[in-house]
Image (cartoon, rainbow, N blue to C red):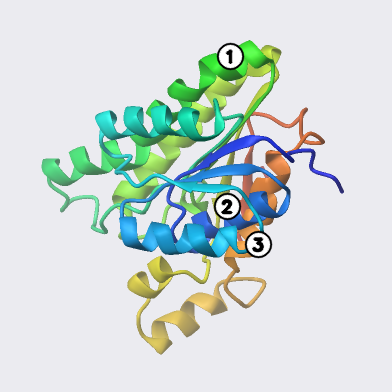
């Protein structure tokens, strides 16, 4: 299938590794012109070089999307590099772990900026040009926790659910302008974040036993779902949350 994104300007945050890098690679393979972002400048530069080796046009802009001023600067530098983004992938690292009763206000405030407000500010920043062009794709990378909260991931559970609700509301507001807004909710995926959360073999084996597919997902599998939602053929898909979780979430709706 031709995804019809060749030549489109795309901004992918959290793109130095894991799911974010895989998404950037998938869009690069389809011919999109990319700006990739992450906090770690050295890791981001290495990731961008790997992507350029495939022949893709890739620009690296380091910055912390948890900070409003840096989001504004990122959007400005993206416009300079590739023009107004036609595709936005809002992906941010997970906030710290902790139980609901134990997390103090400072951690809530930091999680709010990192997980929820980064998505809100990025979307607000790209929307005027997308509306004007009559075409745009916004995809928020969230988690299966928006459907089924995960123990000890209180901040992620709360704020990724907020991103989902924001995206669903926004989708209704901009659909008539040719802009789609969707979320992809990964399940347990083989990334460094998973290694941090489930470090020992016993914990990982117990987790795999709960997954109907009996394995962890691969970043490329999440990326394939995101790439489709960015495509021309997905123009009538908006306001949705697509679970890519190996069957973990068992609800009918």
Residue 222's place in the image compared with 127, above or below, is: below
Tell me the mark number nearer the camera, choosing from 1 and 2. 2
Q: What is the spatial separation of the Cα atoms under label 2 and label 3, in whole angstroms?
A: 12 Å
Q: Name the residue under label 1.
A: 173
Q: Which callout, 3 or 1, points to the residue nearer the camera?
A: 3
Residue 75 on image: x %, y %: 42, 30
Q: Residue at image x 31%, y 44%?
A: 63
Percent of width and height locating residue 48: 49, 57
The answer to whether residue 195 of the structure is visible from this angle is yes
Write the residue at 39% across / 75% down: 195
Q: Give the residue number, with chain letter if any, for mark 3.
A: 54
Of tags 2 and 3, the one toward the viewer is 3
Left/right of residue 158 with respect to residue 175 in the rendered view: left
Is residue 136 left or right of 209 when viewed as pictured? right
The residue that label 2 is drawn on is 24
Dots 3, 1 in contact, CB < 8 A: no
Query: Quarter of the image containing the C terminus?
Result: top right
Q: Where is residue 105, by image quadrant?
A: top left
Using the image as rendered, state which of residue 103 and residue 25 is in the foreground: 25
Q: Which residue is nearer to you in this view: 22 or 6?
A: 6
Report the residue that reaches farthest toward the right.
1
Query: Helix, strand, or loop for circle 2?
Result: helix
Per the model, the C-alpha gap separating discs 1 and 2 is 27 Å
Q: Quadrant of residue 109?
A: top left
Disc 3 and disc 1: Cα gap in Å?
37 Å
Q: Is residue 227 above or below residue 67?
A: below
């Amino acid at each position: 299938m031709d995804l019809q994104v060749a030549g489109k300007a795309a901004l992918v945050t959290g793109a130095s590794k894991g799911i974010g890098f895989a998404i950037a690679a998938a869009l690069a393979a389809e011919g999109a012109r990319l700006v990739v972002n992450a906090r770690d400048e050295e890791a981001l530069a290495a990731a961008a070089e790997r992507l350029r080796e495939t022949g893709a046009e890739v620009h690296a802009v380091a910055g912390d999307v948890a900070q409003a001023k840096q989001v504004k600067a990122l959007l400005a530098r993206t416009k300079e590099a590739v023009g107004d983004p036609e595709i936005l992938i809002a992906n941010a690292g997970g906030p710290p772990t902790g139980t609901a009763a134990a997390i103090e206000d400072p951690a809530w405030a930091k999680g709010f900026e990192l997980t929820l407000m980064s998505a809100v500010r990025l979307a607000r920043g790209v929307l005027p040009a997308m509306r004007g062009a009559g075409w745009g794709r916004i995809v928020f990378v969230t988690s299966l926790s928006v459907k089924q909260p995960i123990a000890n991931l209180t901040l992620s559970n709360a704020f990724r659910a907020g991103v989902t609700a924001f995206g669903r509301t926004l989708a209704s507001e901009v659909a008539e302008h040719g802009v789609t807004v969707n979320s992809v909710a990964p399940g347990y995926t083989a990334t460094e974040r998973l290694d941090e959360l489930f470090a020992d073999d016993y914990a990982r084996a117990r987790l795999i036993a709960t997954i109907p597919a009996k394995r962890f997902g691969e970043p490329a599998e999440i990326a394939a779902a995101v790439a489709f939602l960015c495509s021309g053929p997905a123009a009538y898909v908006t306001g949705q949350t697509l679970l890519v979780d190996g069957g973990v979430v068992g609800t009918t709706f």
